[in-house]
Image: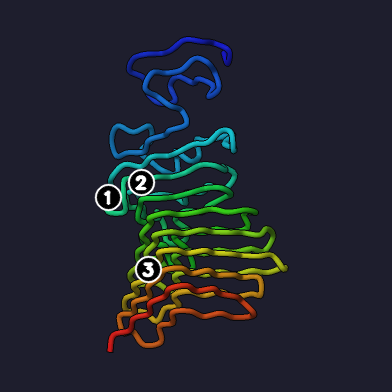
Amino acid sequence: HPSASGKVDGLDTFLKSVIPVNAPLYEVNQDPKRITVAKKGGDFSSISASVAWITGSSENNRYVIEVGPGKFVENEIDLRGRPYVSIVGSNIQTTEIFPSSSNQHIVRMGINNEISFLTLTGAGSGYAAIYVDDIGDFAQAHKVSINDSDIGIRVNSSTLETQFYGEYIDINGTYTYGLYISSSNSLYAFANMENYYQFPVGSPIKGNYAIGPYSLMSIKAALFQNDGTINATAFQLEDGAQIEITSLDIQVPP
């Protein structure tokens, strides 16, 4: 009952005891708004399953999903419809997420979501490690490493204006686009990247690509270090896209 008071103490399995989040009754050592994902001993063993469990998240009902060390092969982690949910890994060296198939994004972000302290690897052709599409406000990422994903970060607006903020993000390996921004229907698509690094290997990539007059890119304190591959492009803007750059280092081997 939502007005029940007191506490539940002892060994319990997550989801076995269903206690309304706002009830006075609580379970000792279990915060229902702090969810753990781990290979063993967590509330869930799957990140996408933990996200799917959350309902009713809001500005006054926020959740954090804490992911332990290990390699996690996941269905698309879809945060849309779950505002104010954050996914926090152990760190970029120990928490790595792979897609379960080649035809999915790894993380699809929604409004007021954040991911941090993890690595994303292996998004297939035409798909992104981080996909931000028509969310109506902003999403953000902090201390994220992206490896061998066809598109590192994809930001798009066609029905709602969309903003993405990234800090301490590195994109590595073989890929087609590092950052891809597109806009249509006079709606802004904006990406702000700070302390941002790209290290492409063996492919004629477009490091940062924006298309559409309402596509905006802000780059602050960035490094683009090409491995010498011919036709690799650090920045490409089309159809009136705009860019602001502060403190950029582009390195190409002699």
Labelled disc at residue 94: 1
The answer, for residue 224, to whether it is visible in the render is yes
Secondary structure found at label 3: strand
Q: Which residue is outermost to the front?
A: 247
Q: Quadrant of the C terminus?
A: bottom left
Q: How is the image coloured?
A: rainbow
Category of crowding for the residue at label 2, using alpha-carbon neighbours closer than 10 angstroms: few (below 14), some (14–19), many (at least 20): many
Residue 66's image quarter?
A: top left
Q: Earlier in the sequence, mark 3 or mark 2?
A: 2
Dots 2 and 1: beta carbons under 8 Å? yes
Q: Which residue is mark 3?
A: 197
**Is residue 125 in sight in this rendering?**
no
Separation of marks 3 and 2 at Cα, in angstroms: 20 Å
Q: Is residue 17 left or right of residue 202?
A: right
* Residue 59 at x, y percent in the picture: 59, 38
Residue type of the residue flagged with mark 2 = Gly
Between 134 and 77, which is closer to the camera in this rendering?
A: 134
Q: What secondary structure is marked by label 1?
A: loop
Give the residue type at disc 3: Tyr
The mark found on residue 60 in the picture is none
Q: Along the line of sight, which residue is nearer the eye, 253 or 124?
A: 253
Q: Nearer the viewer, mark 1 or mark 3?
A: 3
Pick whichever of labels 2 and 1 is earlier in the sequence.
2
- Which residue is found at the position 54% from the left and 10% from the top? 4
Residue 161 left/right relative to 223:
right
* Number of marks in picture: 3
- Which quadrant of the rendered structure holds the N terminus? top right
Crowd band around label 1 with a 10 angstrom C-alpha radius: few (<14), some (14–19), many (20+): some
Whole-percent x, y for residue 218 in the image? 53, 68
Q: CA distance from mark 1 to mark 3?
A: 20 Å
Numbered tag placed on residue 89 in the rendering? 2
Residue 224 horizontal/vertical position (percent): 38, 75
